Image (spheres, rainbow, N blue to C red):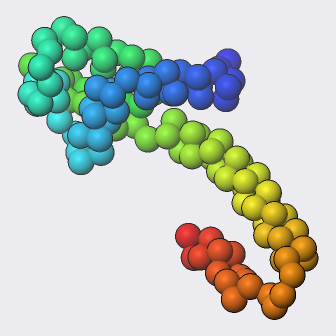
Amino acid sequence: MTTTSDRLTATFSALADPTRRAILARLALGETSVGELAEPFDMSLPAISKHLKVLERAGLIARGRDAQRRPCRLAAAPLQEISDWVASYQRFWEQRLDRLEAYLEQNQPGPPSRRKGKRTDARKSR
């Protein structure tokens, strides 16, 4: 059984390479063949295939078979796991910034800041 931590490690490892991130960006536009994926890169098809294997092991892409064609498509579930993981830290920093804002408002001399509430309101609209 693969733990969430193991999946995150595999996903982050796959995303560490700029070529693999570029491949995922292309696949976000739709399914395509390995040859079409390789076109913009100055590397051999075997090198592209190695990148695709890393992405496939991380669960970020799925490959099919259509006669001689091997189409690839994005499998975004691991990206959602990363998004969820990052969101927990976003909440952490938002809470810290809220406490800092409250501290500054309590300890600044003079009238209250005219900016009061703007950061919070902007954050809620996300």
Where residue 118 sits, quadrant-wise, is bottom right
Give me the residue at 31% from left, 17% from top.
Answer: 51
In the rendered view, does 57 fall on the left or right side of 72? right
Residue 24 spot, x, y in % from top left: 32, 36
Number of marks? 0
Relative depth, front residue between 67 and 21: 21
Relative depth, front residue between 71 and 125: 125
In the rendered view, does 103 fall on the left or right side of 118? right
Residue at the right extreme of this rendering: 106
Give me the residue at 28% from left, 34% from top.
Answer: 22
Q: Quadrant of the C terminus?
A: bottom right
Give me the residue at 52% from left, 27% from top.
Answer: 12
Q: Is residue 95 above or below residue 88?
A: below
Residue 41 spot, x, y in % from top left: 14, 25
Residue 89 spot, x, y in % from top left: 70, 47
In the rendered view, does 2 fall on the left or right side of 76? right
Q: Does residue 100 appear in the picture of this structure?
A: yes
Where residue 122 sits, quadrant-wise, is bottom right
Relative depth, front residue between 11 and 114: 114
Q: Does residue 63 appear in the picture of this structure?
A: no
Q: Is residue 123 above or below residue 26?
A: below
Where residue 8 sits, quadrant-wise, is top right
